[in-house]
Image (spheres, helix red, strand yellow):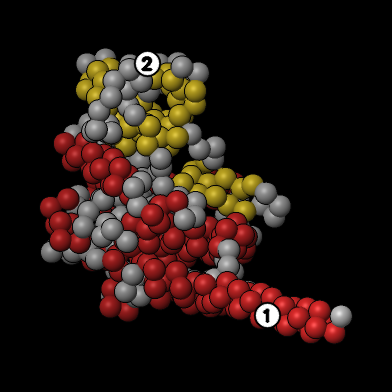
Amino acid sequence: MKQICLQCERSSTDSNLFCHEASCPAEMSPHILEYGELLGDIEIIRLVTVLRSATLYEAQVNKKKIMLKVAHPGPEHTNRIKREVSFLQEIAGKKQYNKYNSGLPRLIPPYSNKSGTEGYGKAMFKGNLLYFFLFEYFEGEPLRDSLIKNPQLWVYHIGWLEINLARTVALMHSIGILHCGLCPESILVRFEGDPAVPTILLIDLGIVSTPDNIINFWYKDAVLPAYTAPELLGKRPYADYRTDVYGVGLILYELLIGQPAFPFRLSNDSEVYEAVRANRRVPMNRIEDVRPAAILAIRFTMPNPSERPNNVADALKELLSTAFEDTPETKRNRGLSPRTAFMLLAILLITAIVITILLNVVLSRV
């Protein structure tokens, strides 16, 4: 079990993590489970990613691979993970959840030998009470890791990633839930098929709050500073559906320019927050080959929410109508529209009537 600093990313294997930077909270960093360690009957295989509020692992139970998400210590983090589970339980019963690949985790009961409705589990590990939940295994890597290896993705991959992400967040909005913390670290991605199409899984659901409750649930430690919307950094933080338009747009912006809009490596949180407040971002330096997408990325991330689309569903419509084609998988799954089905049925009926008339004419002459 080791410690990893959430800000400077230093690590220590002896629980004595120290940083010479006065602003770095290294000593308060969470402990990270390592290969082979057990959390109850859950065996750790590998660390997938460390988020500001939780850690994601690939694990196994009875030799079956699963994903394990463990909240960092502290009531804000544990309450947030409870809201995640509650939302995933609620959305799983909705009709639209299975319409396409939802992009959301599918929960697994936290205990193999115990039934319950909470959806999350608790386990002691080396004197620490850890809150966690399990979900179905997803083979992929954090989008951040993918971008480190290849900062300038193929434009079709950019479009398909963005469309899948917008569709997933719009699904959250459909039952009145805001995310407010989208970032490449919160997304797993894999590329498969021919052509290679990205499939995503949104492994972190942000603040998980209705607009009315955001003032009660919002806390800075849940979200990376570089991906925090400006309206959440004022003296009176607020958020609505346009806040997630900003998040979707910020990821599009980063995919287009090949780096974070607000660089944050080797910077402390207060410096990054100030850059976001002042809108000191990397200029949009890629326009010629992706002009419609670049224009949308700029508009979606306007500091003033009134200049953005009203919600992510509207933003998705703009992405599909002006910038990108839909994913091949969605096109295959979409099937016939009601209008097309009606027209085909009408043609079949007319054909049947004509054939019947012709047969009657032929038979009358025999």
User: Residue lying furthest right in this view?
Assistant: 366
Q: Determine whether the residue tagged by mark 1 lies in a helix, strand or loop.
A: helix
Q: Determine whether the residue tagged by mark 2 lies in a helix, strand or loop.
A: loop
Q: Residue at image x 45%, y 35%?
A: 136
Q: Is residue 72 left or right of residue 236?
A: right
Q: Residue at image x 38%, y 54%?
A: 95
Can residue 22 be seen here? The reply is: no
Compare marks 1 and 2 and give the one earlier in the sequence. 2
The 10 Å Cα crowd at callout 1, few under 14, some 14 to 19, many 20 or more, is few
Residue 319 position in % (x across, y down)? 49, 72
- Above or below — where is 69 with respect to 267? above
Can residue 217 be seen here? The reply is: yes
Residue 331 found in image quarter: bottom right
- Above or below — where is 258 with respect to 119? below
Residue 337 position in % (x across, y down)? 54, 71
Residue 147 position in % (x across, y down)? 54, 50
Residue 249 position in % (x across, y down)? 42, 66
Q: Nearer the viewer, residue 322 or 361?
A: 361
- Whether pointer 1 and pointer 2 mark residues with C-beta atoms closer than 8 Å, the reply is no
Q: Please name the amino acid that badge 1 sits on.
A: Ile
Q: Please name the amino acid that badge 2 sits on.
A: Asp
- Above or below — where is 154 with respect to 320? above
Residue hosting label 2: 41
Q: Nearer the viewer, residue 151 or 143?
A: 143
Residue hosting label 1: 353
The dot on residue 101 is none
Q: Residue at image x 25%, y 43%?
A: 86
- Above or below — where is 223 with respect to 318? above
